[in-house]
Image (tube, rainbow, N blue to C red):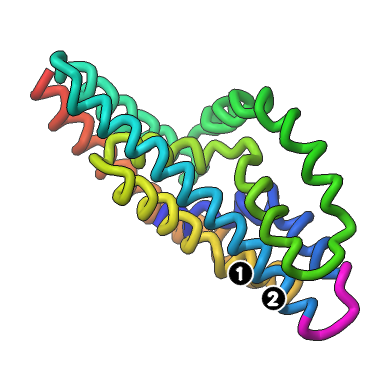
Amino acid sequence: MIGVLGSAHCMGMCGGIASAIGLTSVSKSGKLLTPLFYNFGRLISYTLTGAVIGGAVASASQIATDFAVLNWLRLLSAVVMIVLALYIGNWWQGLLTVEKLGQHIWKYISPVTTKLLPLKSPVYAVPLGFLWGWLPCGLVYSTLTWAAVSGSAMNGGFIMLAFGIGTLPAMLAVGVGAGYIKNIRNSATFRKVGALILLCYGTYIAYETVRLL
């Protein structure tokens, strides 16, 4: 749901490169395969990151003697989800500040992406999509906090994979009815109903966690 609701944000951040790489192919098959390969690489990046973070926190929890630390992590994920809901509902844009945290990493990855352009063949869009999965994004960081307290590497990977799949319809439709899809995603009713669901869920998790502290 986060991926679907936030896909308009994804189109704004990654839509430009996604549509640009599609134009690099002159054949009809290339125009179709390049966006598919690009998004496949992006999903691999999300899934791998979620698995690593979920597995690392799960492993740490097994050797931790102070379980209050894990509860504080869960509380953090709940707070971040509430902040995400406020962003999706257009009630508060504080999530954009979180994106700045990843700019230090992105400045080292960005030069590598330029070396892959122009694409020699559609398959080169896979590593490009993988690298662009590290683009500073508040939505990704928010979902990663959920993956961190998911309990295992598999759960963390699946959470991030589900997020990526939620963004796929809009990302694949860039340049093909993208304006129509963006209008739906930007619908005040659509965004606010989804944001309220996330807000309620985040508040519930926060409440249950505080009871354990």
Instruction: Determine whether label 1 and label 2 are within 8 Å by CB.
Output: yes
Nearer-the-camera pick, 33 or 180: 33
The x and y percentages for residue 87 are 49, 39
Asked if one can make out residue 152 in the rendered structure from this viewpoint, the answer is yes
Residue span colored magenta? 24-29
Queried whether the magenta region covers residue 204, the answer comes back as: no
Q: What is the three-letter code of the residue carrying label 2?
A: Gly
Nearer-the-camera pick, 94 or 28: 28
**Viewport quadrant of the N terminus:** bottom left
Question: Residue at (28%, 35%) from the top-left corner?
Answer: 149
Mark 1, Cα crowd under 10 Å, few <14 / some 14-19 / many 20+, is some
Which residue reaches farthest left?
Answer: 211
Which residue reaches farthest bottom?
Answer: 28
* Secondary structure, magenta segment, majority class: loop
The x and y percentages for residue 120 are 86, 65
The x and y percentages for residue 143 are 42, 42
Asked if one can make out residue 85 in the rendered structure from this viewpoint, the answer is no
Q: Which residue is mark 1?
A: 181
Give the secondary structure at mark 2. Answer: loop
Q: Which residue is mark 2?
A: 177
Q: What is the three-letter code of the residue carrying label 1?
A: Ile
Image check: 120 left or right of 47?
right
The CA span between labels 1 and 2 is: 7 Å
Question: Residue at (61%, 49%) from the top-left corner?
Answer: 9
**Viewport quadrant of the C terminus:** top left
